[in-house]
Image (cartoon, helix red, strand yellow):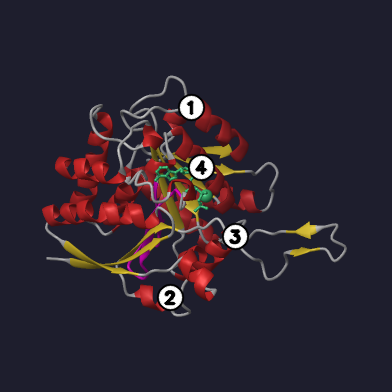
Amino acid sequence: MDAYEIAVIPGDGIGPEVVDAALPIVADAAENAGFSFETTRFDWGTERYLDRDEMMPDDGLDRLSGFDSIFLGAVGHPEVPDHVTLHGLLLPIRKGFDQYVCKRPNVLFEGIESPLRGYGAGDVDFVVYRENTEGEYASVGGREHRGFDHETAVQSALFTRRGTERIVRAAFEAAAEREGRLTSITKSNAQAHSMVFWDDVVEDVAAEFPSVEVERLLVDAAAMDLIRRPHEFDVLVASNLFGDILTDVGAQITGSMGLAPSGNVHPGESYPSMFEPVHGSAPDIVGEGVANPLATVLSWSMLFEELGEIGAADALWNAVTDQLADEDAPRTPDIGGTAGTGAVVADLRSRL
Ligand code: ATP
Ligand code: MG
């Protein structure tokens, strides 16, 4: 029997609430599928920052490196600037473990109302593969600067063949396993170096996947088309910045932040991947016991899938699908109900 070691960083705000609520059902799913896992908790986040001026200890990455996977609740605090949480914890983990795929499924579940008129269950089901280590968020050898006169600012972007090829290949592999459609997002008309390079790489990799139909879209058109015809997308692949923007559009058209899971994935065995709900610490609802735990449960489903535990992954995903489709099931206020976090998980456990 396999026993996995999972590092858990519950984090801030509703992070610990949803993480703790979800753990029992996650353990059930593993037990039913015939494996077990142990969790080790790390109380890293903004409380630690306010106390000791650091989000995580200096040897944080070393301490995480031996784990099979990492689960993160949420980080953020109204009095701590976003760049501190980003640069103090999230980016070091993503970069340190070379988690070059940011994977965000967008599924419109039966029983959830989309803000898009006419869209219902099963109409939207696509996944965004966002490049997670370079692109517009990379530093290019100190070239970025504000002019001394404060009248100019320079920001560059870095696209390497290795970095572009591996995210594009991961997206093609996903498309080949799904509906066989891949949409590559660029701005090749305006960014004649980086994005034309991206197009060239897509063309090269496409040759390895003759069964996948490739569409190229400019990012502005993509933003429009995600609203106009979201049902036509299967896998989207985009640079760091464009992927960041489009995944937020995706989260909205599929109903609620409380339902959106994500993974920061390093394919292969060298490093642990990290899974987390897309939402933040939601300070406005902390302590009220109404945080939606479903994004967390779906993120655990993705974690199990990455470990190859497809049975447990499917069981969790299906339990959520089942619950949302049931009009009488408890749901949290963000998706139109009145139930608390605990009641939702208790109901979910009975559906496993
Ligand atoms: P952070 O700074 O940590 O990102 P935030 O203020 O940006 O926090 P988010 O967590 O991104 O807040 O949430 C945005 C909105 O969505 C909030 O109004 C919040 O209440 C709601 N929300 C987010 N996650 C959930 C959830 N799991 N259940 C219910 N509502 C949620
Ligand atoms: Mg936020």
**Which amino acid is tagged 4?**
Asp
Residue at mark 4 to residue at mark 1: CA–CA distance: 16 Å
Is the Cβ of the residue at disc 2 closer than 8 Å to that at disc 4? no
Report, in whole angstroms, how far the alpha carbon at label 2 lies from the one at label 1. 43 Å
Q: Which residue is mark 4?
A: 248
Task: Assess whether mark 3 and mark 2 are in contact (beta carbons under 8 angstroms).
Answer: no
* Nearer to us: label 4 or label 1: 4
Mark 1 sits on what residue?
229
Residue 213 occupies quadrant = top left
Front position in the image: 231 or 197: 231
Name which residue type carries label 3.
Pro
Which residue position holds label 3? Answer: 81
Which quadrant is home to the N terminus?
bottom left
Q: Amino acid at mark 2?
A: Gly
Would you say residue 59 sits in the magenta stretch? no
- Could you tell whether 194 is left or right of 65 in the image? right
Q: What segment is highlighted magenta in the picture?
A: 261-279
Q: Nearer the viewer, mark 3 or mark 1?
A: 3
